[in-house]
Image: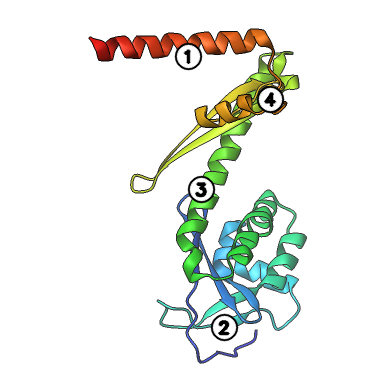
Amino acid sequence: MNHHIPLDVNAPLRLDYAKGFPLRVIRREEGFWFVAAEIAAAMKQEVEALLPMLEQPAGRLLLLAGEDEPVLCLSEGELDEIVRRVKKPGARRLRRWWQEETRPALLHEGGVASTVESLHLALALAAEAAQQVSRAVMAAVLRGPGPWQHSRWVVALDYERHNKQRWPHGKLIGLSSSVATLEGLAELIAEPGRMPVNNGDLVKLAAACHLRLAERMGRIAG
């Protein structure tokens, strides 16, 4: 084990890998580092079982903010090696979480301190969207052959920061359907060739708008 202890104190970014399970990510000039004990726990392994998989000396002792003593940390390369060699679902989930979700978000923002809130929000909403799509697809397929085979899905998410509530909603729409705001719909219809609608559809839409306006004008006059 490498007992080199840098003089600087590292401020880790605390992220939620799973519900109630934080992982600390340390960003240094040479790359990202992770607390070895937390990585092992995420894969339901013991640190002593993971270290022999790595080239020795494995890991580095880093002094982290909030800790009185240096903590054994693993480099990003060591993490990649571990998740490649551990043939268990926990390792695959950790690999996807880091390489496909968290790492790109950190690199995109370019800074750790300024990304904490936005990164937490992005990961939370991405997880909600994935869960909603999974439920919608499963329910549609279990109902048997139907329009889901030739349709699209629209997923809406409502986030309440203080209450930490995320309410996903999914809706099946046909391939010929379009989704737009009312203002956007007016622009699509007004521009020739922008939106393929026939005369019958335009007449129905115009009649509906006329009826609604007449109803509102009647209320105002009353």
Q: Amino acid at mark 3?
A: Ala
Crowding at dot 4, Cα within 10 Å, few <14 / some 14-19 / many 20+, comes out as few
Could you say where residue 24 lies in the image, as x and y percent from the top left?
A: 52, 67
128 lies above or below 15: above
Choose the circle earlier in sequence order: 1 or 4.
Answer: 4
Q: Quadrant of residue 214?
A: top left
Of discs 4 and 2, which sits in the foreground?
4
Crowding at dot 3, Cα within 10 Å, few <14 / some 14-19 / many 20+, comes out as some
Could you say where residue 110 lies in the image, as x and y percent from the top left?
A: 59, 69
Of discs 3 and 2, which sits in the foreground?
3
Q: Amino acid at mark 2?
A: Leu
Q: Which residue is mark 3?
A: 124
**93 displayed left or right of 119:** right
Q: Amino acid at mark 1?
A: Cys
* Secondary element at tag 4: loop
Q: Which residue is mark 2?
A: 61
| Alpha carbon separation for disc pair 3 and 2 | 31 Å
Of discs 3 and 1, which sits in the foreground?
1
| Alpha carbon separation for disc pair 3 and 1 | 39 Å
Q: Quadrant of residue 213?
A: top left
Number of the label disc, if any, that sits on residue 209 = 1
Q: Amino acid at mark 4?
A: Met
Could you say where residue 204 lies in the image, as x and y percent from the top left?
A: 57, 8
Choose the circle earlier in sequence order: 4 or 2.
Answer: 2
Q: Which residue is mark 4?
A: 195
* Secondary element at tag 1: helix
Choose the circle earlier in sequence order: 1 or 2.
Answer: 2
Residue sitting nearer the eye, 32 or 209? 209
